[in-house]
Amino acid sequence: MFDSLSTRLDKAFKTLKGQGNITEINVATTVKEIRRALIDADVNYKVAKEVTDTIREKAMGRDVLIAVSPGQLLTKIVEEELAALMGGSRVGINLSGNPTVILIAGLQGSGKTTFSGKLANYLKKQQKSVLLAACDIYRPAAINQLIALGEQVGVEVYAEPENKDAVAIAKNAIAHAKQRNIQTVVVDTAGRLAVDETMMNEIAALKKTLAPQETLFVVDSMTGQDAVNTARVFDDRINFDGVVLTKLDGDTRGGAALSIKAVVEKPIKFVSNGEKMDAIDAFYPDRMARRILDMGDVTTLVERAQEAFDQEEAERLSKKIRKNQFDFNDFLSQLQQIKKMGNIKDLVGMLPGMNKALKEVDIDDDSFKPIEAIIRSMTPQERSSPELINGSRKKRISMGSGTTVQEVNNLLKQFGEMRKMMKKFNSMSGGKKGMPSMNPFA
């Protein structure tokens, strides 16, 4: 997401690079390019004009410091204004109530059911007990999908497949949650079209009857400006509390993310991409602004690492590194934990400058598979003592893993260099307890 916008903004900033000072002419040229970039990203024209007018006024009103170039100054101003455009600061969800009721609404195909499963998993990680309520009475597959997702994340699903009254099902689900002292009920509803009066009446009735603590409107970010217009119609009917942007990994220009807060005046609370149940993030406008400008999002990267990496495992690994005993079993364990953090390209893209570097590079979650296959084809003795792997063993490992001997050689070489680096680092630290972790994500 935002790849095209990031490229266009970078091009706009180049107008000011090398300039000694900010003038009305060079700022006007740059701001014009920024406005075009926003409009091409499907940002509402009025919103794009207002934000670029603000950027121009702020740029002309600031003096350029000796240590800061005009290009750097304008980049900082754009970062601030993009963050403000998307809400300024993080707005969390309301978890009061006994139980807390969260109503999920949105158009057909926006990803509501998948998001409901992700939200349940997210809340479960926050130490909240959760019940999923299957209230899509029109699509039998939706109930089955929610039940499957519930099983996947270890959350109970309340469903009445034969009942065709969504309001009654939701009320029964809440009663069920109260009986079992479940803290949160996530109500998954049917996808509807804004022009379908019967369906819109149903979601309005659900909102009125349940009086949920939180109503989230799920938006497919790939629909761009249409999503913003639809959100406005839904907000008029159900007055939702926040927006969820799904499918951020798709071919989307980002207009919905940039416009929706300004147009509907409701905050974006979550973003999600992919089908994995942990592919959900709380929305931070300032972090997203930095990612758009290819300045990275190290804070989110660290937070994901803290969630994925087990502290006891990290301490065990640290001891083995201090004793120069790091082996392929440890390496495989580290790969598994990195994969828990989410989409690999998304993770790398959180590092400053990497979006531009990876624009033409295809990185997917299958990137580690050949490495894992090679390690799993080794005997326990070979994993713990890689120096035992000779020519015949390499041939057997390559055949067992479906790779070439060259690929096995490359992995052994890279692993050997990594162990040398760890040994060198260990000797520099004196082998002391409490040495920094060699894990780049720790």
Image: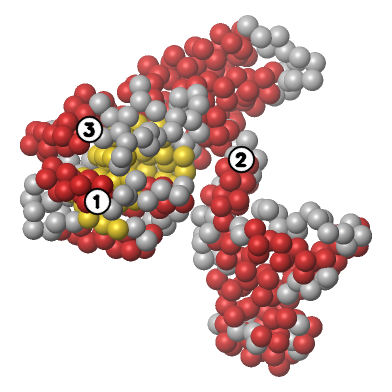
Q: Spatial distance from mark 2 to mark 3, Cα to Cα?
A: 35 Å
Note whether 17 is above or below 290 in the view shown. Answer: above
Residue 151 visible in the current orientation = yes
Q: Classify mark 1: helix, strand or loop.
A: helix
Residue 36 visible in the current orientation = no
- Between disc 1 and disc 2, the foreground one is 1
Image location of residue 279, percent across then percent down: 45, 51
* Residue in the foreground of this view, choosing between 184 and 57: 184
Note whether 14 is above or below 114 in the view shown. Answer: above
Q: Is residue 192 left or right of residue 145?
A: left
Q: Amino acid at mark 2?
A: Thr
Residue identifier under label 2: 299
Q: Residue at x 48, y 30 (%)?
A: 90
Tag 3 near tag 1, CB within 8 Å: no
Q: Classify mark 2: helix, strand or loop.
A: helix
- Between disc 2 and disc 3, the foreground one is 3
Tag 2 near tag 3, CB within 8 Å: no
Q: Residues within 10 Å of mark 3 (few under 14, many from 20)?
A: few
Q: Which mark is residue 211?
A: 3
Q: Is residue 387 left or right of residue 340?
A: right
In the rendered view, how is the structure colored?
secondary structure
* Residue in the foreground of this view, choosing between 142 and 361: 142
Q: Is residue 148 left or right of residue 381?
A: left
Q: Classify mark 3: helix, strand or loop.
A: loop
Q: Residue at x 60, y 19 (%)?
A: 77
Q: Is residue 432 left or right of residue 311?
A: right
Note whether 236 is above or below 404 in the view shown. Answer: above
Q: If you read the primary sequence from the N terminus, does the residue marked by circle 2 or circle 3 appear first? A: 3
Q: Which mark is residue 179?
A: 1
Q: Residues within 10 Å of mark 1 (few under 14, many from 20)?
A: few
Image location of residue 351, percent across then percent down: 64, 44
